[in-house]
Image: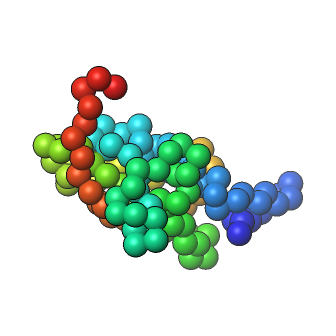
Amino acid sequence: MTLEIKNDLGSIDIAIDVIANIAGNAVVESYGVVGMASKHQVRDGFAELLGKENYARGVIIENNDGNLDVDLYIIVGYGIKISEVASNVQSTVKYNLEKTLGLNINAVNIYVQGVRIINSED
């Protein structure tokens, strides 16, 4: 599935997986986020951490007439205020998608799938 952007020079097709990977990279770089989780918990295992190549499995993109709704499934660090982490992730993802791809972002929804202890060795 692709998102088509038209301009005066022609059209650009952007794969939904590309948008999901950009959003996933922005998420895991945010403070307080341990990693991305799968959107299919029952099938993939409860709160499984996704690797860099699988970020698209933790992101759902819906196109509503050129405005995108982004659903993110994340795992946050223990002892960190979840509402602050979610707010930070929302603003970071929205900014990255709007500036990188020039897309209109309608909503960024956060689904916290688990809480894990952050390793101090990393």
Percent coordinates x, y for residue 7 in the rendering: 78, 59
Q: Is residue 122 left or right of residue 15?
A: left
Residue 105, how many percent across, how many down?
50, 61
Q: Nearer the viewer, residue 99 or 69?
A: 69
Does the rendering let one see residue 7?
no
Extreme-right residue of the structure: 9
Colour mapping used in the image:
rainbow
**Viewer-proximal residue, 19 or 67?**
19
In the picture, measured across the screen, residue 19 lies left or right of residue 31, that is right
Residue 48 drawn at (x, y percent): 39, 55
Q: Is residue 31 visible?
A: yes
Along the line of sight, which residue is nearer the eye, 113 or 65?
113
**Location of residue 99 in the rendering, given as x and y in whole percent from the top left corner:** 56, 45
Residue name at image x 30 percent, y 61 percent:
113
User: Which quarter of the rendered picture does the C terminus lie within?
Assistant: top left
Quadrant in which residue 1 is drawn: bottom right
**Lateral position of residue 67 relative to residue 18, left or right:** left
> Which of the 4 quarters of the picture holds residue 119?
top left
Q: Residue at x 20, y 54 (%)?
A: 83
How many numbered callouts? 0
The residue at 29%/23% (across/down) is 121
Of residue 75 and residue 95, the one placed in the foreground of this image is 75
Q: Residue at x 55, y 57 (%)?
A: 56
Q: Residue furthest top?
A: 121
Res 112 → quadrant: bottom left
